[in-house]
Image: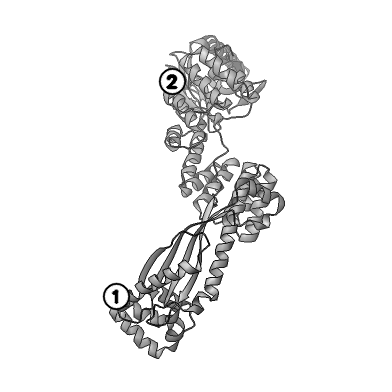
Amino acid sequence: MTKTFKMIAAAAAVLAAFSCSSMEEMVKMAENVEISCEPGVLEAVGGSIDPVVKVTYPDGYFNPKAILEVTPVIVYGGEEARMAPFVYQGEKVKDNYKVVSSAGQTVTEKLHFDFVEGMEKCYLELRGVVKAGDKEFALPVRKVADGLNTTYMLAKTEGIVPFKADNYQDTYTAKAEGQIKYLVNSSEVRNQEIKGSSIKDFQKTVDAINANDKATVKSTEIVAYASPEGAQDLNNKLSGKRSESAAKAWSKIMKGYGLTDPEIKSLGEDWEGFQKLVSESDIPDKDLILRVLSMYSDPNVRESEIRNMSEVFTALKDEVLPELRRARFIANVEYANYTAEELLKAVEENTDVLDEEALLRAATLVKDKAQKEALYEKAVKKFNSARAQFNLGALYLAQNKLDKAAAAFAKTDANDPEVENALGVLALRKGDLAAAERYFKAARTPEAKTNLGVVDILTGNYDKAVQDLADAKGCCHNTALAYLLTDQLDKAEKAIHCGSAECAYLKAIIAARRGDAAGVKANLEKAYKDKDLKARAANDIEFAGYDI
């Protein structure tokens, strides 16, 4: 028994000595292990760092009885980010790790790190420990990548949400109108019509227009008609005579009012007027009347039906037809609306005089955000303005008041493409890229397509970003960045057409990739107007090797 124990102990001692020797040999030969990293400079994409590391163990290196643990580590600013180690085993190890042949083998691993602030200046290293039994030896640390490219993070992520436009007109038109009525089959202008309330009201309105600095009579008309219950030829002639008698009356009635001579029109039978008066009347079965008349396209047949109906329906004869035997006096008036200065004055003194469109226009003129908000709120309260409600949300977004913006948009039409785009921007601002993408794809507006390009950049879909941003209006920054990220330097440079510090920074990167040291320096000097960009440049791998 004692002899057996001594033999086992001796064998164990020999094995331990062999194991230590073998591990030390792996440490000594570690420099023969080839390691490569793709990309050579780490790149952050969509908040992740996912390089691929390839390790080639030469023939005779990996001991069949060894276990090797390799830990990828990103070192940055005095901090470290570690992955769980990859564990490999020799061919004679009875375990469940990945086997590496002693005859030589290449192992490829995809690494993953979540980007955290401060990693802009970092390096990736592999730390190895070789084990056998209860012994372990550390392999020399191998740096496999130096620096991290975070250029995609230059994307502007505010999103585009245009305010809904107002329909405010600098000028608007209106008609001032009076009329004289005729007896059946007559074209004589009666004295009681000339002195009637309709003509007197017309004269008063013209007086008021002449006294109004903002009003101008652009043209005048006389339009004569006949009621549609007689023969068509007779009614056409009667309408013509009425236009002539009305013109003579005009020359007397409107003398001294400074109006241009009217355009004289004779329109014959007034079918439109007839249908309008009947539809607005209280006549029983009026819908039946209109439906029956709509069945006939022949004017003569319709006239016959009218005459028949006039005997049955007294209201047609007494209330409708007499109103159609007339000549209209018309003044076409153009009014100048409030000027910008007058709108701003009204904002300060009395917004009650402003209608919905004027309130919406005034909101575009004021600079103060609180005043804008008050104008939109008034338009919502007074006119139930859907556009003002939307613009409230857009105003809150512009101030990055996301909760208020969400509450404002919740009161709008969720099926409105502009609202869908706005909700996408809300999601984008909150970092929910999946929701933002859904909203932008549903909206399908030009702005939504541009905003979708931002999501493409943030998720690393750079080729699609180029497509979505190619026709973007407004700021050129993200379009240029998309071209830059796909290494289309000429297109990136051509896309830049503004002089912002951010665009100057992109130009500096373009120059750096071209090896243009002078261009790097000149553009960074412009970019340094933004202190944040100056701080970024100090750690930006894009400018490695340049004196910045």
Mark 2 in CB contact with mark 1 (< 8 angstroms) = no
At which x and y percent is residue 540? 57, 20
- At a point 47% along the width and 27% down the height, the residue shown is 485
Which residue is under mark 2? 106
At which x and y percent is residue 326? 43, 75
- Give the quadrant of the N terminus: top right
| Left or right of residue 260, residue 409 in this image | right
At which x and y percent is residue 48? 54, 31
Judged from the image, the secondary structure of the residue bearing numbered disc 1 is loop
| Left or right of residue 381, residue 504 in this image | left
- At a point 44% along the width and 14% down the height, the residue shown is 58
Q: How many other residues sit within 10 Å of disc 2, few (<14), some (14-19) or many (≥20)?
A: some
Q: CA distance from mark 2 to mark 1?
A: 90 Å
- Residue 371 versus residue 221: which sits nearer the camera? 221
Q: Is there any visible trace of residue 127 in the rendered image?
A: no
- At a point 59% along the width and 57% down the height, the residue shown is 212
Q: How is the image coloured?
A: one colour
Lower position in the chain sequence, tag 2 or tag 1: 2
What type is the residue that disc 2 sits on? Thr
Mark nearest the camera among 2 and 1 is 1
Q: Is there any visible trace of residue 100 in the rendered image?
A: yes
- Give the quadrant of the C terminus: top right
Q: Is residue 112 above or below residue 173?
A: above
Q: Which mark, residue 297?
A: 1
What type is the residue that disc 1 sits on? Ser
Q: Which mark, residue 217?
A: none
| Number of numbered labels in the structure image | 2
- At a point 43% along the width and 64% down the height, the residue shown is 221
At which x and y percent is residue 182? 43, 79
